[in-house]
Amino acid sequence: MLANAYAQTLGQVFIHEMKPMEVEILVAEMGYEGHPDQLFHILYDGTVVDEENFTVLGGEAETIAERLKEGFSEGMELGAALRAAVKALAGPERTLGAGDLEVAHLARSNGRRAFKRIVDGELEQLLSA
């Protein structure tokens, strides 16, 4: 429902404004009691894409997503998934370290805040494992 509301708002702005906004939104719905998690990627024109496993927003999203598909497998541990994502984001010509990143992950045990930020030492440890 939330994804549809965002999509309608963006779609209206895209159609009716002279200078439409260029934003993308990711809505993550955490599944409880056996229901699967869902990712809704809302494009700048209001299009809603139901994503599986991961999504990439902005910039060179298609290129990064293709690189990530090569290193991703369902059920990966957090550290392995994070290393695959950083490798895909960096590409073949550069490297990214913990200081270059702002990282969070979905966390069911984090109360009403479904995202848990991964900071400094923990991020460095996950990237180097």
Image (tube, rainbow, N blue to C red):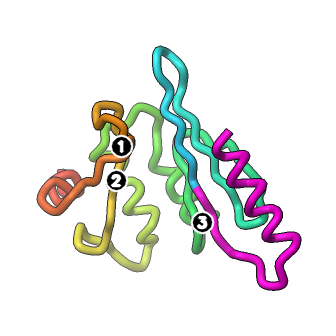
Between the C-alphas of marks 1 and 3, the distance is 26 Å
Residue at the image position 20 percent from the left and 59 percent from the top: 119
User: Under tag 1, what secondary structure?
Assistant: loop
Q: Residues within 10 Å of mark 1 (few under 14, many from 20)?
A: few
Q: Where is residue 111 drawn, in percent x and y?
A: 31, 35
Question: Mark 2 near mark 3, Cβ–Cβ under 8 Å?
Answer: no
8 vs 28: above or below: below
Left/right placement of residue 123 relative to residue 86 reads left
Q: Earlier in the sequence, mark 1 or mark 3?
A: 3
The residues tagged by marks 2 and 3 sit, at their Cα atoms, a distance apart of 18 Å
Mark 3 residue type: Ala
Q: Residue furthest left?
A: 121
Per the image, the residue denoted by label 1 is 113
Label whose residue precedes the other's in the sequence (2 or 3):
3
Q: Secondary structure at mark 3?
A: helix
Q: Quadrant of residue 108?
A: top left
> Residue 99: percent from the left, percent from the top?
23, 73
Instruction: Please tell me the numbered disc located at residue 61.
Output: 3
| Residue placed furthest toward the bottom | 18
Which of the pair 74/105 is nearer the observer?
105
Front-most of 87 and 42? 42
How many residues crowd around disc 3 within 10 Å: few (fewer than 14), some, or many (20 or more)?
few
Q: Is residue 9 magenta?
A: yes
Residue 82 position in % (x across, y down): 34, 52
Q: Residue at x 48, y 33 (%)?
A: 30
Amino acid of disc 2 = Ala
Q: Dot 2: what SS?
A: strand
Residue stretch rendered in magenta on the structure: 1-25
What residue would you read off at disc 2? 104
